[in-house]
Image (cartoon, grey):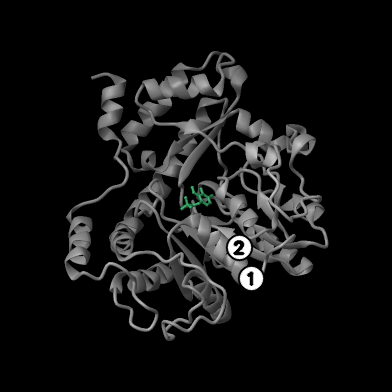
Amino acid sequence: MSFKEDTKNDLPKWPIYDKNEINALSDVIKSRNWWGGFPGDHQGENVWRFQEEFAQFQEAKHCMAVCNGTVAIESALIALNIGMGDEVIVSDYTFVASASAVIATNAVPIFCDIDPNTLVMDVNKIESLITDRTKAIIPVHLGGNPVELDRLLEIAYKNDLFIIEDCAHAHGSRYKGKRVGNWGDAGTFSFQASKIITSGEGGAIICNSDDLADKIYSYIDCGRKKNGYSYAHYSFGTNYRLGELYAALLRKQLEKFPEQHKLRNKNGQYFGNKLNEIGGIQTMKLTPGTEECGYYVYPIVFDLSQFGKITKKEFNKKLNKNGIPTDDCYPPLHRVDCFKNIKLKKGIDYGNANWGKERSFDNNFPVVSDIYSRSIEFPHEILLASKNKLDWIVEYIKTLKKD
Ligand SMILES: Cc1ncc(COP(=O)(O)O)c(C=O)c1O
C-alpha cells in the first residue's frame, strides 16, 4: 500500500458523528421547537441545556450561546462598554476575527508580537503598547496553547484593563489549575465547522460575573433580560442567538469531546517529541503551566536550510501530495489587506494604530513575520490517528531533509 493510501485510511474525517447526532437533530425537527424561545419560556431545551453543560465543562458560572465566535468577541467587548476610539491589544498571530470584532465595536486593535517558542502573544511586549486609550487585551490561545495568563492578569490589573480570552482554539485547555476563558473577564469560543467542538457554525461566551453575564445576554437577545418579558427591551441589543438544531448537535459533540481531548493531548506530546527529534523542525512549545491543550491546530516551524531551502508552499504541497493534510498558518494581521491598506471606518481615529502602510512593515513585527515565513500546520484530527501513522508522517518528513 502506498503511503498516501494508508495515511488517508487512518485519518479520521472531521467532524465525527454517529446516530446520536442524527437522532438529536431528528428529535428537534419533530418537536417543532426550532429556536431557544423567548427568554421567559425556554421553548427549545437544547440551547438552554447546552449553555449549562458547556459552562460546567469549562468550569465557568455562565455561558451564553451565540451564532458564531466572531460575534462572541464583539458581544463581550460591547458588554464591557468598549467602543468608539478605545484601543484593544490583540495578538498579531490569529484569525482576522480576533481583530475584526474590535473594529465592529468602533474600537481600534493594536497588534502584539508573539513569543517565538509558544507562538502566542508575548506578554512582555504588552506594556509598551498601552496608551491612555487602551481598554482591553485579547489574548488568543493559538492551537489551544494558553497565553501566559497569570502574568497577563498582573499587567491588566496594574493598568486597569479588561481581558477577553479568545478561546476559539482552546476548548478544554487548562493552565495552572484553571480552564482558559476563566482567567480574564470573559472567554469566547467558536463552534465553526473545523473547530474541536462543532455544529458547523456557533459560538459562546463564558464568564463568572453575574452582572457581565446579564449584559452579554441582553446584547445578544435584543436587549432583553434573562427570564424577562419578551417585549421588554432594557438595553440596545441585537440578535446573535443560537438555534435549537445547532445546540442539539453541540450537546452530542460535547459528549464526545473529553475522550478526543485526552487522545489529542497524549498524541500531541508523542508527535511533538518525534518531530523535534528530526532536527530542523520546531513544534509549538506549550506555555509552562499548561496542563491540557485544546490543540485546534498543530503548527510546526521549520529551518528552511535543512530542507534544501524549499519554500513552505512547496513543503505543504509535498506533504499534501502524500496524503498528509497540512495548511498555511494565519498571515499575521498587521499585513492582511484590510489593516495594511487601512480601510478607514467613518468617524474613527486610527491615529494610534500600529498598522497601516509603513507601520505594517514586517520589521515592526519581527518574531511573527519570521515564524510565519517558516511555519505550516496540521489539523487537529491528525492527533486522533494511530501512533503508527504519526510515526509514518515523521518518517516521511525525514525523507525531505537535505543535510
Ligand atoms: C482565533 C479565532 N478567533 C475567532 C474566530 C471566529 O470564529 P467564527 O468563525 O465562529 O466566527 C476564529 C475562527 O476561526 C478563530 O480562529
Left or right: where 229 falls relative to 385: right
Q: Which mark is residue 80?
A: 1
Cβ atoms at labels 2 and 1 below 8 Å apart: yes
At which x and y percent is residue 135?
73, 64
Tell me the quarter of the picture where residue 309 sits: top right
Q: Amino acid at mark 2?
A: Ile
Q: CA distance from mark 2 to mark 1?
A: 10 Å
Q: Residue at x 59, y 55 (%)?
A: 101
Q: Which mark is residue 186?
A: none
- 379 or 237: nearer the eye? 237
Q: Is residue 303 above or below residue 235?
A: above
Question: Few, some or many C-alpha atoms within 10 Å of disc 2 (few <14, some 14-19, many ≥20)?
Answer: many
Q: Is residue 309 visible?
A: yes
Instruction: Looking at the image, tell me whether mark 2 or mark 1 is earlier in sequence order.
Output: 1
Q: Is residue 227 above or below residue 8?
A: below
Element under disc 2: strand
At which x and y percent is residue 104?
61, 56
Q: Is residue 183 visible?
A: no
Q: Which corner quadrant holds the N terminus?
A: top left
Element under disc 1: loop
- 201 or 270: nearer the eye? 201
| Beta carbon of the mark 2 residue lies under 8 A of ligand 1 | no
At which x and y percent is residue 318?
43, 19
Tell me the quarter of the picture where residue 358 sits: top right
Which residue position holds label 2? 164
Which mark is in front, 2 or 1? Answer: 1
Q: Residue at x 58, y 18 (%)?
A: 306
Q: Residue at x 59, y 36 (%)?
A: 331
At which x and y percent is residue 81?
66, 70
Q: Amino acid at mark 1?
A: Leu
Question: Few, some or many C-alpha atoms within 10 Å of disc 1 (few <14, some 14-19, many ≥20)?
Answer: some
- 307 or 226: nearer the eye? 226
